[in-house]
């Protein structure tokens, strides 16, 4: 039950703000289409080759393990802004070589970047250069 949210949540965690809703929609549609295909194919497969059809699903799931391991960055303990910053850095396709990307702890460079951003926003707020106007009645 714990893995059921992955196709729905992971795309929103790894995509930039402008692309988040579009890619979430594509991933949701893909999830539904894939579930439909599985529901349509499974009874035919079981009827044709019996219990051995489950070997097909086992192999397909096993094929996805290296794909997930090598291509999917870790999102635990990261903010959406962290992921935006990561993708703005033009990262490589294979993620296993970067300890910051595969660590379950939040990388320090993201923590430092967030602290700098907070300080910059605080200075802008103090100087009055916030970037918005107040409406006074």
Image: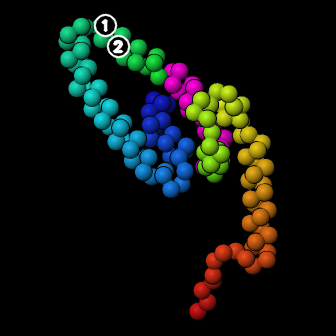
| Residue 15 drawn at (x, y percent) | 53, 46
The magenta span reads: 65-80
Q: Is residue 116 magenta?
A: no
Residue 38 picture quarter? top left
The total of numbered circles placed on residues is: 2
Who's the residue at 36% across and 17% down the image?
A: 57
Where does label 1 land, which residue? 52
Q: Is residue 64 visible?
A: yes
Q: Which mark is residue 98?
A: none
Q: Would you say 133 lies left or right of 48 here?
A: right
> Which residue is at the front of the view, 87 or 56?
87
Q: Quadrant of residue 115?
A: bottom right
Q: Is 95 left, or right, of 124 in this rendering?
A: left
Instruction: State the image coordinates of residue 65 (x, y, percent, origin top left).
Output: 51, 21
Q: Is residue 68 magenta?
A: yes
Q: How is the image coloured?
A: rainbow
Q: Secondary structure at mark 1?
A: helix
Q: Residues within 10 Å of mark 1 (few under 14, many from 20)?
A: few
| Identity of the residue drawn at 31% across and 7% down | 52
Q: Nearer the viewer, residue 16 or 122?
A: 16
Please identify the quadrant where the N terminus is shown: top left
Identify which residue is drawn at 35% across, 38% down.
30
Residue at 42% across, 51% down: 22
Q: Is residue 79 visible?
A: no
Instruction: Name the outermost residue toward the bottom.
Output: 137
Q: Position of residue 21 (x, y in %)?
A: 45, 52
Query: Quarter holding the C terminus?
Result: bottom right
Q: Position of residue 3 (x, y in %)?
A: 48, 30
Q: Nearer the viewer, residue 92 or 16?
A: 92
- Residue 56's label in the rendered image is 2
Asked if the residue under mark 1 is in contact with the one under mark 2, i.e. CB atoms within 8 Å, the reply is yes
């Amino acid at each position: 039950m714990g893995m059921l949210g992955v196709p729905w949540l992971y795309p929103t965690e790894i995509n930039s703000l402008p692309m988040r809703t579009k890619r979430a929609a594509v991933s949701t549609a893909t999830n539904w289409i894939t579930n439909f295909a599985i529901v349509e194919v499974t009874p035919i497969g079981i009827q044709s080759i019996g219990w051995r059809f489950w070997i097909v699903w086992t192999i397909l799931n096993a094929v996805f393990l290296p794909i997930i391991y090598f291509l999917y960055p870790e999102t635990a303990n990261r903010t959406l802004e962290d992921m935006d910053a990561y993708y703005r850095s033009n990262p490589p396709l294979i993620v296993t070589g970067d300890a910051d990307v595969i660590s379950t702890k939040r990388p320090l460079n993201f923590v430092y970047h967030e602290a700098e951003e907070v300080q910059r926003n605080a200075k802008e707020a103090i100087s009055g250069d916030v970037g918005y106007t107040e409406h006074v009645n």
